[in-house]
Amino acid sequence: MIGIDWYLALSAILFVIGIVGVLIRRNAIVVFMCVELMLNAVNLALLSFSAYHGDIGGMILVFFSLAVAAAEAVVGLAIIIAIFRNHLSVDILKVNLLRW
Amino acid sequence: MEIYAFISFAVLAIATALGMVLNKNTVNSALMLVLNMVSIAGLYLLLQAQFLALIQIVVYAGAIMVLFLFVIMLLNVDDDEHLFDRFRVKYLIVTLLAVVVFAQILYGIAGVTDLLPELSSDMTTVGTVEAVAEVLYTDYLFAFQITAILLTAAVVGALMIAQFKADPETGEQES
């Protein structure tokens, strides 16, 4: 039987890869995909806690998290389309209206 | 057997995550993310959550990633010429931050894993569709309906943001 720490370590690695991707990539769509990756990593940690405790509440929470992620993806992609329409680019360095 | 399955899914997940971050082509990145989602669904199966594994593949690898690919092809974004911009100090900070966050998470994990039980044998019946639905439609019914409202609001909001209108008088395009 695999210990829960392996699942949690994998989740941590995926989360950190997501952070690095968010920080170094300039393409807004790829940044957004890295956010999805981080969301998945957290879901994995949540589900492994749920499985090892034998509690179904964690699974329900992951289910709602998936639903919220779907809503978030739809709105985020709409925002990216709106940005592209104004700048003709999805380079996040060119979106600098609120940046000092 | 289970350990081999875990190792292969874990390696696949990490490799595709790295491939997604380090790929110049946006479409390739999205396809890497699909593979990543599928390997995470495999891990869900190992954790006896059959229902969530299916949902993960259908909703994430299916619906959300198709939406991503659709937007990528709609916007017709070029490949990045250079993967990273030239600001070198940034990478130092990024590496430092990544190491700090990783250490923090590992420290947090190390603090709790001793307290946790082994995977209970009755878990095989917990993750099935029947078991999930029984709790979802009774104890969590209110949250479930709130989710429906949230999804409706998200669809309406996305339509409002992404809508494309031309001004009838001047002919100029405005959002």
Image: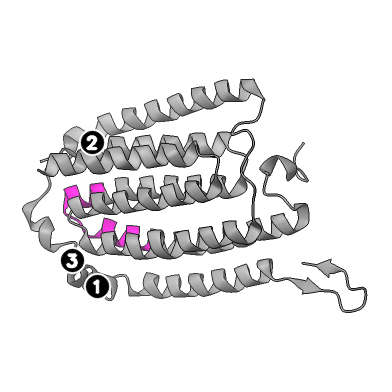
Residue that extends furthest to the right in the rendered view of this protein: B170
Asked if marks 1 and 3 fall on the same chain, the answer is yes
Mark 3: amino acid: Thr
Tell me the quarter of the picture where residue B56 sits.
bottom left
Residue B120 is a magenta residue: no
**Front tag of 1 and 3:** 3
Residue that extends furthest to the bottom in the rendered view of this protein: B168
Q: Which residue is mark 2?
A: A6
Tell me the quarter of the picture where residue A1 sits.
top left
In x, y percent, where is residue B139? 28, 71
Q: Nearer the viewer, residue A54 or B27?
A: B27
Magenta part mainly helix, strand or loop? helix
Instruction: Label 3, secondary structure: give it.
Output: loop
Chain ID of residue with mark 3? B
Chain ID of residue with mark 2? A
Q: Is residue B92 above or below residue A47?
A: above
In the rendered structure, which segment of residues is drawn in magenta?
A48-64
Asked if marks 1 and 2 fall on the same chain, the answer is no
Instruction: Label 1, secondary structure: give it.
Output: helix
Mark 1: amino acid: Ala
Left or right of B3 on screen, residue B17:
right
Distance from Cα at disc 2 to Cα at disc 3: 23 Å
Determine which of the numbered discs, if any, sits on residue B128 in the image. Answer: 3
- Give neighbour class at mark 2: few <14, some 14-19, many 20+ (Cα, 10 Å): some
Q: Is residue A11 above or below residue B94?
A: below
Mark 2: amino acid: Trp
Tell me the quarter of the picture where residue A75 sits.
bottom right
Q: Which residue is mark 1?
A: B133
